[in-house]
Image (cartoon, helix red, strand yellow):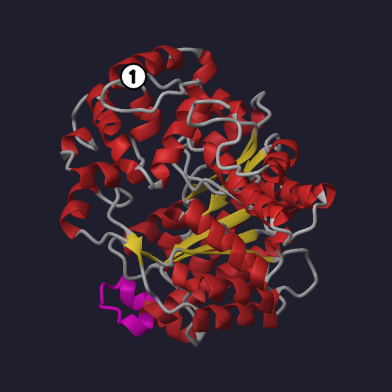
Amino acid sequence: MSTTFIHDNFLLENKYAEELYHNYSKNQPIIDYHNHLAPQQIADDVIFDSITKVWINGDHYKWRAMRTLGVNEQYITGKSSDKDKFLNWAKTVPYTMRNPLYHWTHLELKRYFDIDELLNETNAEKIWEETRIKLQSEAYSCRRLLKKVNAELVCTTEDPIDTLEHHHTLAKADYNVKVSTAFRPDKAIFISHKGYNEYLIALGNVAGVHINSFTSLCDALIKRIQFFHDSGCRLCDHGLDKIYFENYTENEVNSILLKQLEGQPITTTEAAKFQSAVLIFLCETYHEFGWVQQFHLGALRNNNSRMHSLLGPDTGWDSIGDYPQAQKLSAFLNALDSKNKLTKTIIYNLNPADNEVMATMIGNFNDGSIKGKIQWGSGWWFLDQKDGMTKQLNTLSNMGLISCFVGMLTDSRSFLSFPRHEYFRRILCNLLGDEIKRGELPNDMEWIGKLVSDISYNNAKNYFDF
């Protein structure tokens, strides 16, 4: 048996799990249908000059761990050298045991750099130099990193005002990893957020629409949806604390928008009505275009106002929120379904207390028209670890059909994060292998292997219309 930590049967606890993983899952291509990679880096085929730039910069998972250990911010997001930032991350790694960062770190070092050592303060200098030399090779350019992990599709996330110039460049390139985008119009929804009026000016400029009413806002959004669609986009994404669903009239929401444009204060009730109206309009339009809509629900963002003011959003100051989800989500989906305008939908929850809510909610609107039309997404953010993914798989199995599940995604800003698909696949195969061993599932490798292949790749391939 291998003495390395990341060995062939890592996380696979019996022969059934091993067979499922190695024969039915391991070699399946990756469809990463939601991430936050920078398309310009892929279009320019960037070669990173240090592991810090490709591995630590932008990774708020690592940043939170380093801060917890007492690492000064200058070695995290500050002006220290790339090498010093890496050395401080290496010092942190041994203290991350039982956090998924420990597994991810060593999977990524193994898969991308063939490094079997456990990263720590002692070997950090050597590993820094080894990765620095390797990263200088064209074999480690952005495009080749995606090829290295057998990626078939990666789908980045862009605002409606984005030109998509880098996606257009990639569409013409001689490159057989498809790079698409997801439309994320949250800034057009959040009427109470700072800078909303300025955002509408920018949106209107790119759409060629003077936005001075709710109708003209909708006109601008549909023009951008058409532009994204013509550019190959087939899905959207929303990052919301919860689904908004309030009764409203068009006159009401028009008056609310005019108040905002005139600089008058908007009440919480008015904001909820307006956000509901924009969200319903967008989702009806997604149905018209045949897109998949995604909703990431439940984050409590920007909790540390002092650090948020210094570093901005998405720098590691977010946590799980405890918003009520079921009633508004049900009413929202029902309103769309009642008009036969509910498109394919994936719902992700950040609060594990909502697992059973989500697993049962999707069954209310799976109407037999499309296999797995309404999906409960994989464990996300704080839940994309072994325990979180296992609970998601078990709950979905108990209350739905795991066989229809579209599987894993990275939701990451790092080009080295794709072994998370491997991590998920190993956890899935071990879960099923353990139940075969205990006699809770039949020893039918052909059928259960098909189920594993479907969850790993085939279901997503068939679900998304690219």
Estimate how packed mark 1 is, as few (under 14), some (14 to 19) or many (20 or more) residues with alpha carbons within 10 Å: some
71 relative to 138 in the view: left or right? left
Is residue 439 placed above or below 262 in the rendered structure? above
Say what secondary structure mark 1 lies in.
helix
Q: Residue at x 72, y 49 (%)?
A: 452
Residue 256, percent from left and from top: 38, 80
Q: Nearer the viewer, residue 354 or 91?
A: 91
Asked if one can make out residue 210 in the rendered structure from this viewpoint, the answer is no
Q: Residue at x 54, y 76 (%)?
A: 357
Residue 447, percent from left and from top: 83, 52
Q: Nearer the viewer, residue 34 or 4?
A: 4
Residue 216, percent from left and from top: 50, 68
Is residue 9 placed above or below 215 in the rendered structure? above
Is residue 165 placed above or below 457 in the rendered structure? above
Is residue 185 placed above or below 173 in the rendered structure? below
Q: Which residue is mark 1?
A: 128
As shown in the figure, which amino acid type bears the numbered disc 1?
Answer: Trp
Q: Residue at x 58, y 40 (%)?
A: 422
| Magenta-tinted stretch | 257-270
